[in-house]
Image (tube, rainbow, N blue to C red):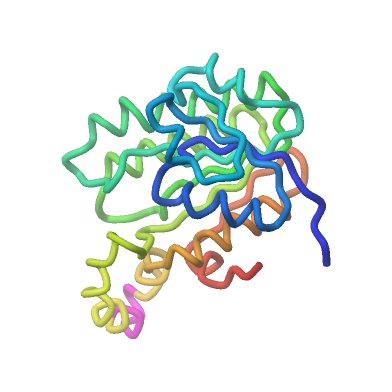
Amino acid sequence: MAVPPRPVLVTGATGYIGQRLIPALLARGHAVRALARAGSRDRVPAGADVVVGDALDPASVTAAARAGDTLVHLVGTPHPSPAKAAQFRRVDLPSVAASVAAACDRGAAHFVYVSVAQPAPAMKAFLAVRAEGEAMIRGAGLTATFVRPWYVLGPGHRWPLLLVPFYALARAVPRIRDGAIRLGLVTIDQMIAALVHAIEDPPPAGTARIVDVPAIRASRV
C-alpha cells in the first residue's frame, strides 16, 4: 500500500543513523529537510534540503521546522560510554530540549526520538539523559515515538558481535532472559526499517509509544 509522502525534519542528519535514514526516506518519496552546521552540510545525503543551523539552539531548530513535520531527533554523543557523562548533558540533553521547543512552537505532527533500552544495569548517565529527553517530550504533550535500541551494529560498530554467544546463553536462563532480550543487539538495517515504519505509521495524536528491541528487530518496510 502506498504511503503518503510526509515532510520530515531530521536533526543529527550527518551521523551514523542519519546518513542512512535520509536516503531511505527519500527513496520512499518523503520530503526531507536536514539540520546541519555550516561545516557539515556537505556530509548531508544528496536529495535532502539542507538547513544550516545549530541543533542545540532552539531558535535554529524552530527556524528549520514547519507545521505538520515529523521531527526525527538523532542528535547524540557518538560512541556513548560512561566516560562521556558530561557530554551527554552538554550535547544530548540541550539538543532534545531545543527540538521539543521547536516541535511545540511550529506544531509538529509527530516527534520521533532515538532513545535507549531501559532499564539497564550499565551506562547510567546515558540512560538518565535519554529518560529525561523522553520525559520532556511526554510533558509537552507531543505525539511521539521512542525508539529504544541498546547497541546498533553496523560499519565501525561491530565489536559487540563478540557477545553474541553470551546473549544466546543469557536467553536460556529464565532469571535473566527478559534483560537479555530487552538489551539485545540490532542491526543498522533493522534500525532504519524501524524508523521508517515509525515515520510512516505514527501513533494516535497526543500519545507516545515505545518501539523496543524486539519490535526493532521485527520491523519491515
Residue 140 point in image, percent of width and height: 62, 27
> As displayed, is residue 21 above or below residue 105?
below
Residue 105 point in image, percent of width and height: 67, 18
Q: Per the image, is 17 magenta?
A: no
> As displayed, is residue 105 above or below residue 17?
above
Q: Which residue in the rendered view is the most extreme toward the top?
A: 59
Q: Residue at x 27, y 55 (%)?
A: 121
Counting every numbered tag in the picture gives 0
Side of 167 relative to 214 (left or right): left
Q: Residue at x 21, y 74 (%)?
A: 162
Asked where in the image residue 207 lies, by quadrant, the reply is top right
Side of 113 relative to 123 (left or right): right
Q: Nearer the viewer, residue 87 or 63?
A: 63
Side of 213 relative to 152 (left or right): right
Q: Nearer the viewer, residue 158 or 137?
A: 158
**Where does the N terminus fall, quadrant-wise?**
bottom right
Side of 202 relative to 83 (left or right): right
Residue 52 point in image, percent of width and height: 51, 24
Q: Residue at x 71, y 48 (%)?
A: 30
Q: Residue at x 55, y 45 (%)?
A: 46
Residue 176 point in image, percent of width and height: 32, 73
> As displayed, is residue 173 above or below residue 8?
below
Secondary structure mostly seen in magenta is helix
Asked where in the image residue 153 lies, by quadrant, the reply is bottom left
**Residue stretch rendered in magenta on the structure:** 170-176
